[in-house]
């Protein structure tokens, strides 16, 4: 299988195998409107198998949630066909508008227009909690 290089964009590498579509969903990347390549279940020395996401000519992709949803991931920034920067995402202090609270009594499930807001409660356990009801976030 041959997947060509991208000229300008980002490559999200070391995504847990089988989760690339979930990552696109959380990052709010619309596959129907974005030039992208998904490589799924590729061989990996570190993970055994992995997914790779290549996004060409993307504008604003908010990568804040990446470390929460794909903890092994790395991001390569590509300009002019060359990788110009490699980034290892970190857990953000806040996740806003990324995940939804599953507590049926939370104000965010009954009131329209409220942003879903979570704060990092425990970095070692990768635990986020709802700002409104303190419910633990689920991936």
Image (cartoon, grey):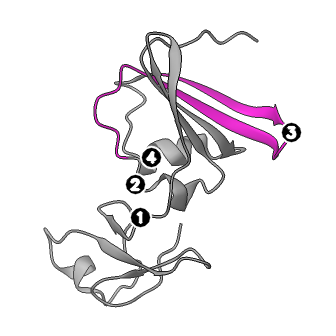
Task: Kindly indicate whether the residue at mark 3 contacts the one at mark 2 (C-beta within 8 angstroms).
Answer: no
- The tag earlier along the polypeptide, 3 or 4, is 4
Task: Kindly indicate whether the residue at mark 2 contacts the one at mark 1 (C-beta within 8 angstroms).
Answer: yes
- The tag earlier along the polypeptide, 3 or 1, is 3
Residue carrying label 2: 64
Residue carrying label 1: 92
Residue carrying label 4: 25
- Give yes or no for residue 44 being in the magenta stretch: yes
CA separation in Å, label 1 and label 4: 18 Å
Residue range in magenta is 36-62
CA separation in Å, label 1 and label 2: 6 Å
Residue 55 in the image: x percent, y percent?
46, 26
Res 58 quadrant in image = top left
Residue carrying label 3: 45
Residue 81 in the image: x percent, y percent?
50, 10
Secondary structure type for disc 1? loop
Q: Nearer the viewer, mark 4 or mark 2?
A: 2
- The tag earlier along the polypeptide, 2 or 3, is 3
Q: Residue at x 70, y 33 (%)?
A: 40
Disc number for residue 32 = none
Tell me if 31 is positioned left or right of 21 in this view: left
Res 46 quadrant in image = top right
CA separation in Å, label 3 and label 1: 28 Å
């Amino acid at each position: 299988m041959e997947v060509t290089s991208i000229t300008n964009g980002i490559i999200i590498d070391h995504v847990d195998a089988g989760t690339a579509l979930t990552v696109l969903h959380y990052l709010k990347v619309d596959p129907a409107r974005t030039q992208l390549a998904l490589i799924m279940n590729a061989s990996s020395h570190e993970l055994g198998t992995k997914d790779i996401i290549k996004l060409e000519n993307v504008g604003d992709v908010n990568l804040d949630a990446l470390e929460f949803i794909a903890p092994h991931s790395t991001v390569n920034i590509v300009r002019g066909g060359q990788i110009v920067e490699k980034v290892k995402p970190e857990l953000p202090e806040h996740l806003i508008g990324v995940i939804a609270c599953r507590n049926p009594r939370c104000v965010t499930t009954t009131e329209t227009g409220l942003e879903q807001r979570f704060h990092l409660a425990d970095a070692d356990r990768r635990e986020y909690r709802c700002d409104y009801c303190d419910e633990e976030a689920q991936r």
